Image (spheres, rainbow, N blue to C red):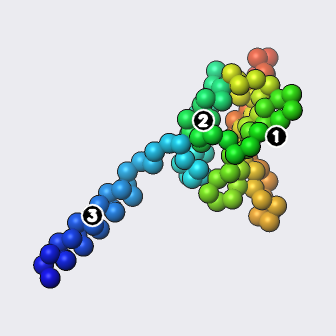
């Protein structure tokens, strides 16, 4: 009986410790990836996205890259650019059933744009 109690206590402490540990990337959990994606800078390319989200679920672009990453909550991250070395836009889209506008997570600022 004591052995079972010891094992139960050990298992619960391991589970509690892993819940407090930071999640490893790549991930598709919105609470983890959205803050990471907000760190995007003008020098970041698609390797930045791959480090955070892994491989894209699909590329629907023709002439430009439009990469889709489906998140665990059913929303999607959409990233676009003309070439893989610089990201133009990262936005989050929600299924139409949720009826929520998508969020712009990152947008490349034009060099003459003073509204940063």
Mark 1–mark 3 distance (CA, rounded to whole Å): 45 Å
For label 2, the crowd category at 10 Å Cα-Cα, with few meaning under 14, some 14 to 19 and many 20 or more, is some
- For residue 81, what is the image quadrant? top right
**Is 80 on the left-hand or right-hand side of 45?**
right
Instruction: Give SS at disc 2.
Output: helix
* Of the image marks 1 and 3, the number of the one nearer the N terminus: 3
Which mark, residue 60?
1
Give residue 112's position: percent from left, percent from top. Answer: 79, 17
**Is 3 on the left-hand or right-hand side of 45?**
left
Considering every residue shown, the one lying at the far right of the view is 62
Give residue 59's position: percent from left, percent from top. Answer: 77, 39
At 66% from the left edge and 30% from the top edge, which residue is drawn? 46
Which mark, residue 2?
none
Q: Which residue is mark 2?
A: 50
**From what the image shows, is residue 24 above or below residue 13?**
above
Instruction: Give SS at disc 1.
Output: loop
* Of the image marks 3 and 2, the number of the one nearer the N terminus: 3
- For residue 65, what is the image quadrant? top right
Give residue 14's position: percent from left, percent from top. Answer: 29, 61
At 39% from the left edge and 58% from the top edge, which residue is drawn? 19
Instruction: Give SS at disc 3.
Output: helix
Which mark, residue 13?
3
For label 1, the crowd category at 10 Å Cα-Cα, with few meaning under 14, some 14 to 19 and many 20 or more, is few
Whether residues under marks 2 and 1 lie with C-beta atoms below 8 angstroms apart, the answer is no
At 17% from the left edge and 72% from the top edge, which residue is drawn? 6
**Is 25 on the left-hand or right-hand side of 54?**
left
């Amino acid at each position: 009986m004591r052995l079972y109690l010891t094992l139960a206590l050990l298992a619960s402490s391991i589970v509690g410790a892993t819940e407090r540990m930071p999640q490893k990337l790549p991930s598709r959990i919105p609470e983890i990836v959205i803050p990471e994606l907000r760190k995007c800078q003008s020098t970041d390319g698609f390797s930045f996205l791959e480090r955070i989200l892994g491989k894209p679920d699909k590329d629907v672009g023709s002439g430009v890259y439009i990469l889709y990453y489906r998140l665990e909550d059913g929303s999607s991250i959409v990233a676009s650019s003309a070439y893989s070395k610089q990201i133009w836009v990262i936005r989050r889209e929600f299924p139409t059933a949720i009826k929520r506008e998508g969020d712009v997570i990152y947008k490349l600022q034009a060099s003459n744009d003073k509204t940063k």
